Amino acid sequence: MLLGGVPAGIGATVVGWGLGAFIVEDPSWSSVFADRDELLRWATSLLAAAVVVGVGWAMRRGHERAAVAAVEAERSRRRLEAIQELTAGLSAAVRPADVAEVLARGVVEALGARRGSFGLVEGDELVVAESGDGAGPSRSPVRVPLSIRTPLAAAAREGHVVWVERRAELVRAFPDAAGGAGAGSALAVPVRRG
């Protein structure tokens, strides 16, 4: 069933012009075209109507694509700005803890996440810097045992990416992380120096 769009527009135009040529002009359903010229005039009008419908459809599609491209360009611009801020913050960082804080905040902004953490391994402890939730300043880094059951500690211990997509899986696999502020998913990526 055609409810809208180009096929419906063309169908309505063809049916309207076709029925109009017979019903309006001569309800007895005999041909209303006296000669070939009248048929060509009718066909030309029908073709013009079809072209108008086609051009309108093409313009609408072009507008939709332009709107999507504008949204993507704005998103790319914001990400680029976040990466530039991250680069500037990293160049100003002096201590490893400063680097951790800059990365925790900057990566979250670049990815569009709500929160983020960055951990530094120091012996058998993990120094965790958190980005905060955006409502207030980030908290100072905290020390936790490397044996804690969180995605960040697991990534640091095992040296591979830990990706948890659902809250239920996070609670089941990492019970120490379940007390967080309602995190629904987690991504922990180990970064090695040298």
Image (cartoon, helix red, strand yellow):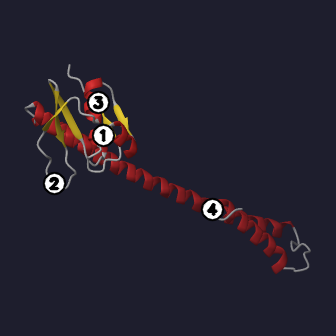
Q: Distance between the residues labelled 4 and 3?
A: 53 Å
Instruction: Indicate the amino acid at tag 3.
Output: Ala
Work out how far the residue at label 2 is from the one at label 1, CA to CA, in angstroms.
26 Å
Find residue 122 and report its image quarter: top left
Q: Quadrant of the C terminus?
A: top left
Residue position marked by numbered label 4 in the rendering:
5
Secondary structure at badge 4 equals loop
Few, some or many residues within 10 Å of mark 4 (<14, 14–19, 20+): few
Give the CA separation, mark 1 to mark 3.
12 Å
Q: How many labels does the image show?
A: 4
Q: Name the residue under label 2.
A: 136
Toward which corner of the image does residue 36 lie, by quadrant? bottom right
Q: Name which residue type carries label 1.
A: Pro
Q: In this view, does 48 lie to the left or right of 60?
A: right
4 or 3: mark nearer the eye: 3
Q: Which residue is painted at 75% across and 66% down in the image?
A: 14
Q: Nearer the viewer, mark 1 or mark 3?
A: 1
Left or right of residue 40: residue 94:
left
Percent from the top left, x then y, of residue 168? 39, 44
Which residue is labeled 1 in the image? 175
Residue 86: give x, y in percent of width and height. 20, 39
Q: In this view, does 40 lie above or below 58?
A: below
Local secondary structure at mark 3: helix
The residue at the point 75 percent across, 72 percent down is 16
Q: Which of marks 1 and 2 precedes in the sequence?
A: 2
Q: Residue 154 carries which label?
A: 3
